[in-house]
Image (cartoon, rainbow, N blue to C red):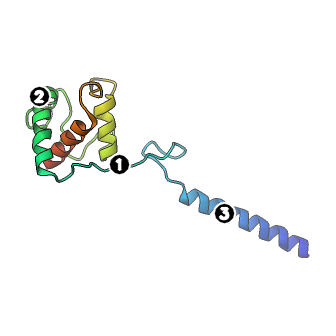
Amino acid sequence: MKQAVLITFAVAVAVLLGVVLMQARPVSAAGAGAAPALEIKNPFAGNTAAVKEGETIFDAKCAECHGGDAMGGSGPDLTDDKWIHGGSDTEVFATVSGGRKGGMPSWKGELKDEEIWKVIAYIRSLHK
């Protein structure tokens, strides 16, 4: 009898531990089982001077595809809530720096990380 109680108790603890561990495991935007993504916030968010610099960079590098108002052209609208590859700061940074199959070039070799963050700060300032 004692052995059955101990086995039942051990199984219950194992199940509970498994449930706790599953709840504690972060899930990335890629879904369950994918490595959790580290979310990075834009270091230039809300910085007026950085937003202005981002606008200058955007006009020179991005407006040709996304339109001068960032509302779309051959590239998607960047002022709404519809983001093909995710709209968090981290996901947008990854898209701009690494590019995406189907038309978005990688800007990693041409723009510094801080310039990409400034462009993102500018884009955020345009949100509808």
Q: CA distance from mark 2 to mark 3?
A: 54 Å
Q: Is residue 22 visible?
A: yes
Residue 102 against residue 42 in the figure, above or below: above
Residue 35 located left or right of residue 48: right
Circle 1 residues within 10 Å: few <14, some 14–19, many ≥20? few
Residue picked out by circle 2: 60
Circle 2 residues within 10 Å: few <14, some 14–19, many ≥20? few
- What type is the residue that disc 2 sits on? Ala
Query: Residue at (90%, 76%) from the top-left corner?
Result: 2
Residue 38 located left or right of residue 41: right
- What type is the residue that disc 3 sits on? Leu
Residue picked out by circle 1: 40
User: How far across and how far down the image is residue 16, in percent?
Assistant: 66, 65
Q: Earlier in the sequence, mark 1 or mark 2?
A: 1
Residue picked out by circle 3: 17
Query: Residue at (78%, 67%) from the top-left corner?
Result: 10
Q: Is residue 84 visible?
A: no
Image-quadrant location for residue 6? bottom right
Q: Earlier in the sequence, mark 1 or mark 3?
A: 3
Label 1, secondary structure: give it: loop
Circle 3 residues within 10 Å: few <14, some 14–19, many ≥20? few
Q: Which mark is residue 101?
A: none
User: How far across and how far down the image is residue 61, in percent?
Assistant: 16, 28
User: How far across and how far down the image is residue 71, in percent?
Assistant: 13, 38
Query: Residue at (55%, 60%) from the top-left corner?
Result: 23
